[in-house]
Image (spheres, grey):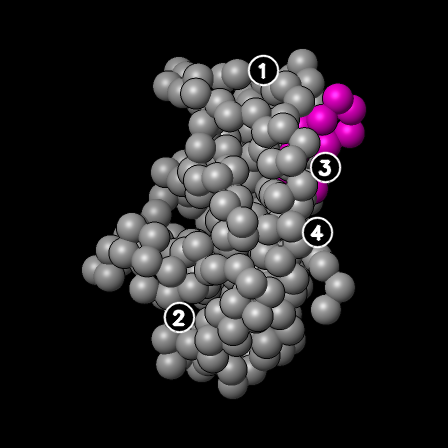
Amino acid sequence: MIKRKNAREIELMRRAGSIAAAAREVAGSMVHTGATTQSINKRVDEFIRSRGAKPVFLGYNGFPASVCISVNEQVIHGIPSPRKLLDGDVVSIDVGVAKDGFIGDCAATFVAGSASPEAQRLIDVTRQCFFEALKYARPGYRVSDISRAIQQYAEENGYSLVREYVGHGVGSKMHESPEVPNFVELPRKRPDPRLTPGMTLAVEPMVNEGCAEIVILDDKWTVVTADGLKSAHYENTILITDGEPEILTVCEAM
């Protein structure tokens, strides 16, 4: 069942979303040559707690860290470690925050040191996939219209999309209905509801430089590209309104 949010719930989601977005910025500011993903995780955890919130990923289905940090060929769910970032590393940061019973979920991809033209293009296209989708996040359209916009933009630019993991509804729980694929299913296996005011969705393109296929590592969490090429991730929590969609994961003043 899709949970449409009332005015009070939407305001609580704005608060959680602003902390999540600020935490994403804190993480991004720490992505530099020589930094460890473990140190980024620690700082973001401290920041989230300093805002009276909790890192929702920590312990979620057993996940051992507060932030997912995925480097280069790692697509999502990378576990922070003593690994030091190298110049040119592509680093995807995924942050989830719980505050007053509601969740903000967002992600972005950064580069340690100097970005190659190829890496920067991958990151830029992935981010723009989200904004192409946002054009269709309006009443009357369907979830598949969001999916189609992401797929068309990524594939027109020569990239592929991860199919095993998708966006989702979000609210008092991390994962709510509906699922929001980054591609159009043929044949369709998931419901394809119309978008209506009060729906809150985490829209999150996961874009691969090479093939779409992925592998899960032995840690049971880290998802990597099957061909070892780079991947990027961009996500915001959005609200469907009577008109223009609202991005709820907007950075608070720090």
Q: CA distance from mark 3 to mark 2?
A: 31 Å
162 horizontally vs 135: left or right? left
Q: Which of pointers 4 and 2 indicates the residue nearer the eye? A: 4
Numbered tag placed on residue 246 in the rendering: 3
The secondary structure type at the circle numbered 1 is loop
Mark 2 sits on what residue?
80
Mark 3 or mark 2: which comes first in sequence?
2
215 horizontally vs 94: left or right? left
Mark 2 surroundings within 10 Å by alpha-carbon count, few (fewer than 14), some (14 through 19), many (20 or more): many
Mark 1 or mark 4: which comes first in sequence?
1
Is 208 placed above or below 168 here?
Answer: below
Mark 4 sits on what residue?
250
- What residue type is disc 4 on? Val
Residue 29 in sight here = yes
Q: Which of pointers 1 and 4 indicates the residue nearer the eye? A: 4
- What residue type is disc 3 on? Glu
Q: Quadrant of residue 202?
A: top right
> Where's the C terminus, which quadrant?
bottom right
> Residue at position x 56%, y 82% from top?
33
Q: CA distance from mark 4 to mark 2?
A: 24 Å
Q: Which residues are magenta?
A: 238-247
Mark 1 or mark 2: which comes first in sequence?
2
> Residue at position x 44%, y 55% from top?
56
* Residue 156 position in % (x across, y down): 63, 36
Mark 4 or mark 2: which comes first in sequence?
2
The secondary structure type at the circle numbered 2 is loop
Numbered tag placed on residue 194 in the rendering: 1
| Direction left: furthest residue | 218
